[in-house]
Every structure is written in structure tokens, then in C-alpha cells.
Image (cartoon, helix red, strand yellow):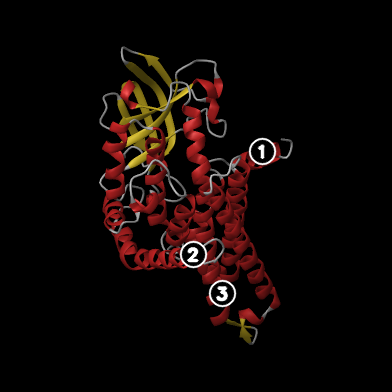
Amino acid sequence: MSTFALSAQQREFAAWVGRVGAEQLRPVVAAGAPGTVNRELIKAMGDLGLLARLFPGGSVSREAASLDLCLLRESLARVSTEAETALALQGLGSYPVLQSGQDEQVRRWIPAVAAGDAVAAFALTEPEAGSDAAALGLAAEPDGDGWRLTGEKIWISNAPEADFYTVFARTTAGAGARGVSAFVVPAERAGLSGEHLDMISPHPIGRLTFDGVQVHRAELLGEPDRGFRVAMRTLDLFRPSVGAFAVGMAQAALDAAVEHAASRQAFGGPLKDLQAVSHPLAEMATRTEAARLLVYSAAAAYDAGERNLAARSAMAKLFATETAQSVVDAAVQIHGALALRKGHLLEHLYREVRAPRIYEGASEVQRTIIARTLYG
């Protein structure tokens, strides 16, 4: 773990997260059913106080701390990608409620998320609105003191098993990003249904169908037609932490490759003595540390209240996720066929590492964000 921008207390916390993740959470992960929400795992993280750390100082507040979130995600990813993902999804689904919700909604949902008693989900993507998130088509038609939602969401993590969804819908037709509103929608609401989707890595993810789902004005997050701002503010917080997830996977792959290269004998000695192996290991270590520093820098800037963070968040996510893909692939190459066997750590990471280059803004989107800032 890098010491950049970290206090002794933060380093101790990261080490503790890694220990409890390995000793207490991995057995709960193993006992769960792949591809479904592991409520026992979420409750265990709540009992350990990990979910409360999504909120500053372990308390319910209107702001989240990016560096703490990055420490949590990196430390968990090194020992259990499933635990890391479950924690991250709790934060992603609940943060819009935390930062933009009315007091009643905050009181209803945030303490339950922190305790591990409620499962959250972030419902933004649609079949025709992925990277172009402003092209949302889920219709929110006025209905009395609220709206009715009609349409579909897809690739929604924790769907259809979440207890509530942060939903982004079109309240003004033809207005692009300026005509989107955000709502918190309880899962039991009439007209809301869903199905699981099978992915390359078995996570809880699915499709949601809204058939005239009623939402009340009290369930509006922020202002009408200003929901896109709610989504982007959430993604500005979470993009560096996606990078932290990637750094954790890269570090796990690097650790496995270093250990294997030291113990595997070939051509009269350990693999590590071959330049064809030692130089890739050096490159993997350098890129992983560079990614970590970029992630921590972006997170620290967020916590310091710096403005114009979009490019820094984009750089952190872009570089860290691309690095993780490269490091995991190189680690597989160093291991050879051993790493291709189902159940091997690197076989698992090879499947896990691909998605972060797509979700919460694909690498191409991050490059576009960065390039735009170069011209003011």
C-alpha cells in the first residue's frame, strides 16, 4: 500500500480491511450463490462497520469521502472482488439519496444501507442509452402529485433484488441532459419488475421494466429536470474508486506473479532470474504504483473540495482500469496454463478485470472528457 496522502491511521485501516476481508468475508462469499445478491455478505460488512465507512467518520452525513472509499475498495479487491463489488454497489446506489434526497428519504434508507439491512441500486443505463447517458428515454409522465415511470433499464447491478433503486428518468422530452430527473423508487412499487442477466463474471445484474410505476414528489432527488447533475456528481465520486478497485486487482495479480516466479523452476533456475520474466514484473509493479498514486491524487482533490474534477477522475479511472487489464494479462502469461484453470485466482481476475473498462464511463468516454479539458 502506498503511503501517498495516507496517514498512519489510514494505512492501519487499509491493513485491517484486508485482514477482515480475507478472514471473515471470503467464507461468506464462498457460501453465497454466484450471480445473486449475497445479503449475508452485505450484513456482515454492515456489522463490521465497513458500510458505515461509505459515510465520513462512520456516520451518516451529506458528503462522502473519496479517499476512504478508495482505501476500502482497493483493500477489499486485493482479497475478495465479490466483497469489494457488494460494498461499492451499496455506495453507488445510496449516494444520490445521501447527497440530494429529502430528509425523510435519507432517514429511511441511509442508516439501513450502513447497517447492511437494505440493498441499493443505481439505475441509469438503458438499452439505447449507455455511454451517451443524456439520451435517456425512460419516461416520467406527470400524474397528480408525482409522476409515472414507463420504460426499461438494463445492466443494473443488484437488479432485480435490490430494496430500492436510484432511477433517472426523462421528465422533459427533447431536452437532453437538462430534462432528466432522479427518483428513489422502493422495489415493491407496483409495476416494477425485472430479470437477471448472465455475465462473463457472475455478479447480480439485471434488467428493470417500469410499467406505469408511480413515484411521488417526496421521492424526487434534487430538483426536477436536474437529475443528470445528481448522476454526474455521483460518478465524479465513484470514478476514482473504480480505479482503486482496479488497483486492488492489479496488486493481487502482481503478488501472485511475483510469488510464482520465485518458486517456479525452469531452465535451470527460478523464473524470476529470467529477464523475460523479471522485466515484465518490473513494468507491472511500476504501472500499478503509478495507477495507485493517480487514484489517490484524484480522491484527495475531491475531498479537498477542488473544482473541475472531471478530468482528474477520468484520468484515474482510465489509467487504473487499463493498467489492471494489462497487469492481470501479464500475470496469466507468467503463470502459463495453470492460470487458465477454472477456480484459479488469475482465471477469476481475468474475468473480473474486463468490466471496469466499460461501466461508469467506458475508457473512450474518459479520454473524451480528458481531451475536452485540454481546450478549456
Question: Disc 2 designates what residue?
Answer: 7
- Considering the numbered disc 1 on the image, is that residue within a helix, a strand or a loop? helix
Kindly identify the residue that appears in the image at 42 percent across and 68 percent down. Answer: 12
Q: CA distance from mark 2 to mark 3?
A: 27 Å
Is the residue 68 above or below the residue 206 in the image? below
Q: Residue furthest bottom?
A: 268
**Mark 3 is on which residue type?**
Val
Instruction: Please tell me whether mark 1 or mark 3 is closer to you in this view.
Output: 1
Between 46 and 103, the one lying in front of the other is 103
Disc number placed over residue 217 in the picture, else none:
none
Residue 19 in the image: x percent, y percent? 37, 68
x%, y% of residue 209?
37, 27
How packed is label 1: few (under 14 Cα within 10 Å), some, or many (20 or more)? few
> How far separated are the C-alphas under marks 2 and 1?
34 Å
In the rendered image, residue 344, in percent from the top left (x then y), is placed at 45, 66
Q: Which residue is mark 1?
A: 368
The residue pinned by badge 3 equals 258
Q: Is residue 27 left or right of residue 341?
A: left
